[in-house]
Amino acid sequence: MELADLYRDVILDHNRSPRNFRRLQSPTNTAQGFNPLCGDKLTVYLVMDGDRVDDIAFEGSGCAISVASSSLMTEAVRGKTEAEARTLFERMHALLAGETGEAEALGKLAALGGVRQFPSRVKCASLAWHALIAALDGAQQPAKTE
Ligand code: ZN
């Protein structure tokens, strides 16, 4: 199996069966994300236990890339410390900017790196991550991809 096929399968799978796709009843942190270019709209919910992400979920609607990216993000961030979550965001940012050196450290998340060939879809892939950071920052305003 080609690596590109494997990556496509990861995205299709997470779009078809998004992980952690639900609303959390008592989140400690939450943020919305909106990508006007595509119409992707999502809300990220976090339950922080001190410095650690005890639970994370999302809901919303959007294209396959944005849903798969949100699903992969929640899976990757659950159980991590805030600092580790922010490091993952930086790595994703670098990957989407074309820094291929990050792919190995990202594991399954590297599947999203393929979208950099389609510049208009990069914001679909980064939306959930911007919302995550906004939630960690305790932002009151929706995260934008601009
Ligand atoms: Zn999109």
Image (cartoon, rainbow, N blue to C red):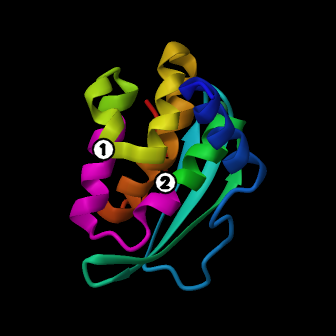
- Disc on res. 105: 1
Task: State the image coordinates of residue 50 (x, y, percent, origin top left).
Answer: 27, 84
Q: Helix or strand or loop: what does disc 2 sit on?
A: helix
Q: Which residues are magenta?
A: 73-93
Whether 137 is among the magenta residues is no
- Horizontal side, residue 81 vs residue 115: left or right: left
Q: Main secondary structure of the magenta part?
A: helix
Residue at the far front in the pictured view: 1
Mark number, residue 73: 2
Quarter occupied by residue 29: bottom left
Residue drawn where x is 21% and y is 62% of the image? 83
Q: Amino acid at mark 2?
A: Met
Residue 3 image position (x, y, % from top left)? 54, 28
Residue at x 34%, y 64% (from the top left corner): 136
- 76 in the magenta segment: yes
| Depth check, front residue: 92 or 30 | 92
Percent coordinates x, y for residue 143 in the rendering: 45, 47
The residue sitting at 25% across, 78% down in the picture is 51
Q: Nearer the viewer, mark 2 or mark 1?
A: 1
Neighbourhood count class around disc 1 (C-alpha, 10 Å): few under 14, some 14–19, many 20 upward? few
Q: Quadrant of ligand 1?
A: top right
